[in-house]
Image (cartoon, grey):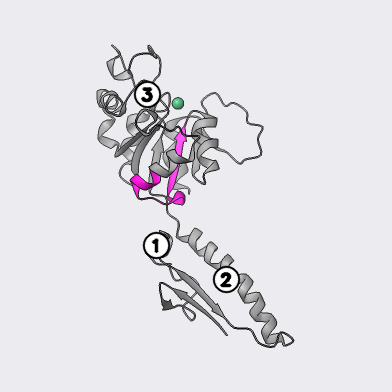
Amino acid sequence: MLRFYVCEEDWSNLPADTPLPHEILTGKGPIGIIGTIGDCQTRACESRWHALDFWPLYVTARMKMNAKLRFVIFDWGDTLMSEAGPLDVPMADWPDVKCIDGAHEVLSRLSKSYSISIATNATVSKHNDVLRALGRVGLKQFVREVFCFTELGYKKNEPEFWNAVLAKLGARRDEVIMIGDSLEHDVLAPMRFGIRAIWLNRKQEGFSGTESIQSVRSLREVPALLEAG
Ligand SMILES: [Mg+2]
């Protein structure tokens, strides 16, 4: 006897492609698997052992099927805006500030389908400075949240940074993707915490690690990559 309960409802006889409810996908609801096994000498019991092995895989596969990208997080410096300026002065106060090529067009397009945020390790600019700089180049209108070291006290290689991001956005890890020009800070760091990432690798630098890295040469390649899943 094996029964499968989702949020206190018996799902044992529902089709395998039934979408899991929001409570399960957000980790708020329970999944219960109740099984009783009698005489293990019988073939029927063998199949039940197989079933018990199968269910966690089944649940994991269905959660992946239901995972949908909702939140796109960009690095700030040299990903959306040029860092060519005095690094001891907030970028917002530089005489000249400029976007990276394609930033306005890409954020405008992506903001129609995704929630867009910024994550930065900048050590001089504070939260409001980042917003002021984004405003000077017309990008602020597309950005929902700014996550910065000067406010959180953590950088992108620390779990506390990503825990704060997920909590503020109300997001699951598999609903988020990080995009940036630093392989270490924008790609490998979030990937260590289960967050997908795309490396903005303009110079087509090599990578010798074992991780599978998605990369683009230009911001303009990002929308098609996200739409391809
Ligand atoms: Mg950067």
Which amino acid is tagged 3? Met
Residue 72 in which image quadrant: top left
Please report whichever mark, 2 or 3, sits nearer to the chain's N-terminal start. 2
Choose the circle earlier in sequence order: 1 or 2: 1
**Residue annotated with mark 2:** 55
Res. 77 visible in picture? yes
Q: Within the magenta stretch, is there residue 178?
A: yes
Element marked by disc 3? loop
Q: What residue would you read off at disc 3? A: 81
Query: CB of mark 1 within 8 Å of CB of mark 2?
Result: no
Pick the front one: 135 or 165: 165
Residue 114 appears in the figure:
no
Q: Nearer the viewer, mark 1 or mark 2?
A: 1
- Distance CA(mark 3)–CA(mark 1): 38 Å
Disc 2 marks a residue whose amino acid type is Trp
| Percent x, y of residue 211 | 62, 40
Write down the region rendered in magenta.
165-180
Q: Which mark is residue 13?
A: none
Q: Where 115 falls versus 157 (above or below)? A: below
Query: Residue type at mark 1?
Result: Lys
Q: Label 3 neighbourhood size at 10 Å, few (<14), some (14-19), many (20+)?
A: many
Rendered-image quadrant of the N terminus = bottom right
State the mark number for residue 28.
Answer: 1
- For this orientation, the residue located farthest to the front is 153
Q: Position of residue 12 (x, y in %)?
A: 49, 80
Give the percent coordinates (x, y) of residue 207: 63, 31
